[in-house]
Image (spheres, rainbow, N blue to C red):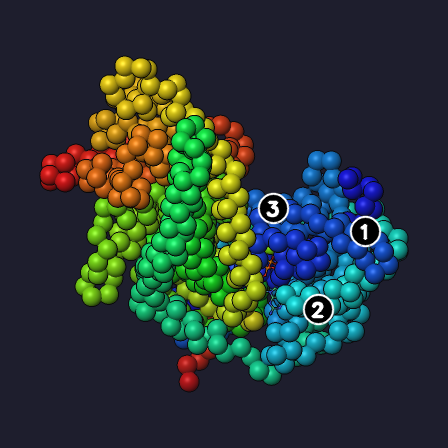
């Protein structure tokens, strides 16, 4: 499952970074995308919680990632593999 | 003074928004901009501090970054300084890694990366007051041992812990520095390994907060709410422009009265003639008509600084991301646009935080369309003269509403132009949008007051230098040569300004401008406010002033002309310093020329349309 599939209130663990269409002409490429996400803390094992969604197309999303709050677009969140906590 | 004399140089490096600039200001007594969002500092700044051991140390403040692997121009500054890649500059002898003590995970990884640079380093756990308030327990000795560097705690905004930091610098400076720099770009695997190491250190030496900050979450659930949040953003901007009008009026009236009194004194006590005209028409009418706007500028900055310090800017970026996306930009670009409310120059500079070259260029090209504070005098003058001061719908002041409309026109046209640039010039791939949302902070009254006063000073300085000297020039041009003996027209028609105005007038007649306006536009290139002062002087010298400048204009111009003038100022590239900064930021004359051409075209077209439509309507 990917972070981009989740909605407000979902929680879980980061499982990895996968290529997700950042390799087009003029784009930054998967390798760069992976390193950027890692540097922001999207590292395997980090906990997250989806806090907010934007108005149009529920995009972008704001999540809590370990100790920080990060906003990102669903398009970029597609690169992030996650494991969702079972809903109680 | 050369760096060699100073000896040691230390560089402040750390994640965005960790308080590097606050620390820099506390150490060196500088007044660089501090605000609660990532990406405030985009340049290298230097200052000097004396250590307890009496060493004079030069301090470098740098843009924040998550890694030395610079992705955007601001981060490249940090990389180049730290690695000594700037021409004529060696790498700083000591690194101070500035960390937000409430948020250590990411910075620990950065600290590990910085260690590989091979320079002595000290870790400053800043915002230690907040960490203590939240009950975060950090084992400082353990942390220092695990990282093998000295660790100190600081509270930059209260100037606490500076001595400890400086004595660590003293000790490191006394030791040997290994001259070889060993950093290389980490691979994804190396970043992961460093994360694991950072995580291990976190678990051993940092205990999570006993009283975590819950306010940020609670406020966000309203301020980032898809519907309520968007409405609140609109309401904030709306309120801001209402306040700029309604709160400022009493103060402005006082300043106006003050200058009117000064003018009267001059005409009473200075014998009629050149000197009287110079003082009353040139200096007092000219500079006075610009200085009147000081209260409005201060109120606008008061609001902007409050929003910045509170932590709202990154939220605005979140809320505006989708709309910006339509124009091919991402939410981050909204921050430069909002900063341009103050002045396009910092706005253009802050576009450095945008990684993608083309997105950055687009942002730079459209930034001057957002309404900068130098337009306020022009807008206010025209609005006060032509728009009735009454309530609409029981709550909104009509003048404030028109002002809001002009600001909306600025932002709206910036987005449309960005969209067109994307369609015409390039279709850049979309850049990832990743932004940290900082915790809200109660704005520090001292910082707010300091920021507002600083802006006031800048405005007064402009009024006293560029604007005053332009006024003197305009007064001279409109007073000489004097009218011939058998003059049939007012004297100003025979002056240089009159000749010049009449010469350019045919170009501007199609958009409804008078020849007096033609005179105001050229010196208005030096600073937009000068146009207001120039009108003040030209009408004063022409002897056509009836009461205030606003009432004069209301009698002299048809409404269509006034609206056309407003439209002109929404678009026209009336600011040489902006063009100069664009040249510096883009490295050539190509883009400033493109900017000048497109803005001039838009201004002419918009004024033409507005004037003719308004004339057809009989205004
Ligand atoms: N309570 C508290 N607030 C602080 C402290 N240091 C900085 N701040 C606040 O933290 C925010 C960020 O400070 P800056 O100095 O602009 O941070 P920076 O690291 O220069 O940020 P960038 O230039 O964007 O990288 C501001 O709102 C400061 O007022 C501190 O020690 N205690
Ligand atoms: Mg800074």
Name the N-terminal-most of marks 3 and 2.
3
B5, above or below B170, in the image? above
The residue shown at (71%, 49%) is B47
Q: Is mark 3 within 8 Å of ligand 2?
A: no
Q: Is residue B52 left or right of residue B554?
A: right
Choose mark 3 or mark 2, whichever is in front.
2
Q: Could you tell me which quadrant the C terminus of chain B lies in?
A: top left
Q: Look at mark 3 in the image and give the residue it sits on.
A: B43
Give the label on residue B56, or none: 1
The local secondary structure at tag 1 comes to strand
B13, above or below B215, in the image? above
Give the label on residue B278, or none: none
Q: Quadrant of residue B416?
A: top left
Q: Quadrant of residue B398?
A: bottom left
Q: Is residue B30 left or right of residue B585?
A: right
The residue shown at (71%, 64%) is B124
Q: Are marks 3 and 1 in contact (CB under 8 Å)?
A: no
Q: Look at mark 2 in the image and give the residue it sits on.
A: B160
Q: Is mark 2 within 8 Å of ligand 1?
A: yes
Please tell me how crowded label 2 is: few (under 14), some (14-19), or many (20+) other residues with Cα within 10 Å.
Answer: some
Q: Is residue B435 left or right of residue B139?
A: left
């Amino acid at each position: 499952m990917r972070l981009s599939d989740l909605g407000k209130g979902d929680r879980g663990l980061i499982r990895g970074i996968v290529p997700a269409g950042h390799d087009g002409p003029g784009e930054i490429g998967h390798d760069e995308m992976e390193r950027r996400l890692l540097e922001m803390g999207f590292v395997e094992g980090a906990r997250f919680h989806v806090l907010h969604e934007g108005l149009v197309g529920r995009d972008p999303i704001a999540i809590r990632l370990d100790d920080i709050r990060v906003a990102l677009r669903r398009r970029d969140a597609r690169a992030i593999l996650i494991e969702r906590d079972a809903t109680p | 003074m050369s760096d060699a004399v100073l000896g040691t140089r230390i560089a402040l490096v750390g994640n965005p928004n960790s308080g590097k600039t606050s620390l820099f200001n506390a150490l060196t007594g500088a007044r660089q901009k501090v605000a609660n969002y990532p990406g405030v500092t985009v340049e290298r700044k230097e200052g000097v501090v004396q250590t307890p051991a009496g060493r004079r140390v030069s301090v470098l403040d740098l843009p924040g970054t998550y890694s030395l692997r610079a992705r955007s121009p601001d981060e490249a500054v940090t990389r180049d300084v730290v690695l000594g890649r700037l021409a004529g500059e060696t790498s700083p002898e000591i690194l101070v890694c500035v960390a937000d003590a409430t948020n250590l995970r990411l910075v620990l990884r950065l600290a590990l990366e910085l260690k590989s640079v091979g320079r002595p380093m000290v870790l400053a756990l800043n915002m230690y007051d907040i960490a203590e308030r939240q009950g975060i327990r950090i084992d400082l000795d353990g942390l220092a041992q695990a990282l093998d560097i000295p660790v100190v705690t600081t509270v930059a905004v209260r100037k606490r812990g500076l001595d400890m930091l400086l004595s660590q610098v003293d000790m490191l400076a006394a030791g040997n520095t290994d001259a070889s720099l060993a950093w290389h770009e980490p691979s994804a695997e190396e970043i992961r390994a460093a994360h694991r190491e950072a995580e291990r250190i976190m678990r051993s030496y940092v205990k999570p907060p006993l009283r975590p900050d819950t306010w940020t979450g609670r406020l966000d659930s309203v301020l980032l709410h898809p519907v309520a949040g968007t409405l609140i953003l609109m309401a904030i901007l709306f309120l801001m422009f209402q306040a700029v009008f309604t709160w400022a009026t009493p103060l402005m009236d006082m300043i106006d009265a003050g200058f009117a009194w000064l003018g009267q004194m001059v005409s009473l006590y200075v014998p009629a003639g050149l000197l009287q005209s110079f003082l009353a028409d040139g200096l007092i009418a000219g500079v006075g008509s610009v200085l009147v706007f000081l209260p409005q500028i201060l109120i606008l900055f008061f609001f902007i600084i409050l929003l910045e310090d509170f932590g709202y800017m990154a939220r605005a970026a979140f809320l505006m991301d989708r709309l910006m996306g339509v124009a091919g930009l991402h939410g981050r670009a909204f921050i430069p646009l909002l900063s341009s409310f103050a002045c396009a120059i910092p706005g253009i500079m802050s576009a450095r935080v945008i990684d993608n070259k083309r997105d950055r260029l687009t942002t730079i090209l459209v930034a001057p369309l957002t309404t900068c504070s130098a337009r306020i005098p022009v807008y206010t003058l025209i609005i006060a003269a032509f728009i009735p001061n009454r309530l609409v719908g029981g709550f909104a002041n009509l003048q404030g509403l028109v002002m809001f409309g002009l600001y909306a026109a600025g932002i709206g046209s910036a987005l449309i132009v960005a969209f067109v640039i994307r369609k015409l010039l390039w279709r850049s791939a979309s850049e990832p949008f990743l932004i940290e949302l900082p915790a809200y902070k109660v704005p520090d009254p001292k910082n707010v007051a300091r920021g507002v006063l600083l802006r006031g000073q800048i405005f007064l300085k402009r009024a006293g230098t560029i604007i005053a000297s332009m006024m003197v020039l305009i007064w001279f041009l409109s007073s000489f040569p004097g009218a011939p003996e058998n003059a049939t027209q007012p004297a100003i028609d025979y002056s240089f300004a009159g000749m010049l105005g009449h010469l350019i007038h045919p170009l501007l007649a199609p958009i409804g401008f008078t020849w007096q306006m033609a005179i105001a536009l050229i010196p208005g290139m030096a600073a937009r406010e000068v146009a207001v002062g120039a009108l003040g002087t030209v009408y004063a010298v022409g002897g056509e002033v009836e009461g205030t400048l606003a009432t004069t204009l209301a009698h002299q111009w048809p409404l269509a002309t006034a609206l056309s003038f407003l439209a002109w100022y929404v678009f026209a590239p009336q600011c040489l310093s902006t063009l100069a900064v664009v040249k510096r930021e883009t490295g050539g004359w190509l883009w400033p020329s493109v900017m000048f051409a497109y803005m001039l075209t838009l201004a002419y077209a918009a004024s033409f349309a507005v004037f003719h439509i308004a004339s057809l309507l009989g205004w």
